[in-house]
Image (tube, rainbow, N blue to C red):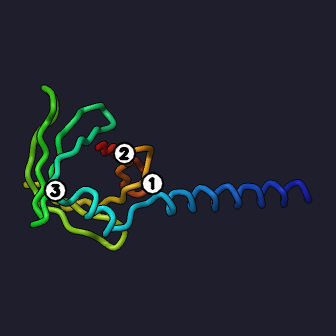
Amino acid sequence: MRASISVLAAAALFVAANNGSDAANRLSPKEIQAEFFNGAPFTSLTPSNTKFTMVFKADGKVTRKPQGNTGVGGEGTWKLSKDGFCTTWKGSKENCFTLVTAGEKKWSVMKGKASVGTWNK
């Protein structure tokens, strides 16, 4: 019985530590806006290694241009959300994301608990 309680306590601490680290590394909407939504281009990398040049302008417009022969460019809009930001690409529905620091000048774009891309500067 004591072993079971110890395992449960250790599991609870592990979950709390992991959830806390994500929250501690998550950028606030204001930080996202200041770092990325200022009209300066940066690189976005998809899980399938397709690179895009992204530009989020202060007026709420966003563009993406493929850096190679794969990927499809696009235009859309962005807005800040309670926890991060949302984008709506032409012809698509709105999707919302958070950003988590993933290294020096590197951030993971998260949809829920899944990483859907990486932003680099």
Q: Residue at point 32% right, 68% down?
A: 29
Name the disc covering residue 72, or none: none
Query: Left or right: where does residue 66 sit relative to residue 120?
Result: left
Q: Are marks 1 and 2 in contact (CB under 8 Å)?
A: no
Q: Are marks 1 and 3 in contact (CB under 8 Å)?
A: no
Q: Earlier in the sequence, mark 3 or mark 2?
A: 3
Query: Left or right: where does residue 76 sit relative to residue 118?
Result: left
Give the amino acid type for the residue marked by disc 1 in the picture: Lys
Query: Left or right: where does residue 28 sit relative to residue 72?
Result: right
| Residue 67 vertical placement versus 19 (above, below) | above
Name of the residue lying farthest toward the right: 2
Residue labelled with disc 3: 56
Which one is closest to the eye, mark 1 or mark 2? 2
Image location (x, y in percent) of residue 54:
17, 47
Q: Nearer the viewer, residue 23 or 3?
A: 23
Residue labelled with disc 1: 113
Query: Left or right: where does residue 84 sit relative to residue 93?
Result: right
Label 1: which secondary element: loop
Q: Quadrant of the C terminus?
A: top left
Label 2: which secondary element: loop
Give the amino acid type for the residue marked by disc 2 in the picture: Lys
Q: Quadrant of the N terminus?
A: bottom right
Question: CA–CA distance between discs 1 and 2?
Answer: 21 Å
Give the amino acid type for the residue marked by disc 3 in the picture: Phe
Residue labelled with disc 2: 105
Image location (x, y in percent) of residue 70:
16, 29
| Residue 6 vertical placement versus 104 (above, below) | below
Mark 2, Cα crowd under 10 Å, few <14 / some 14-19 / many 20+, is few
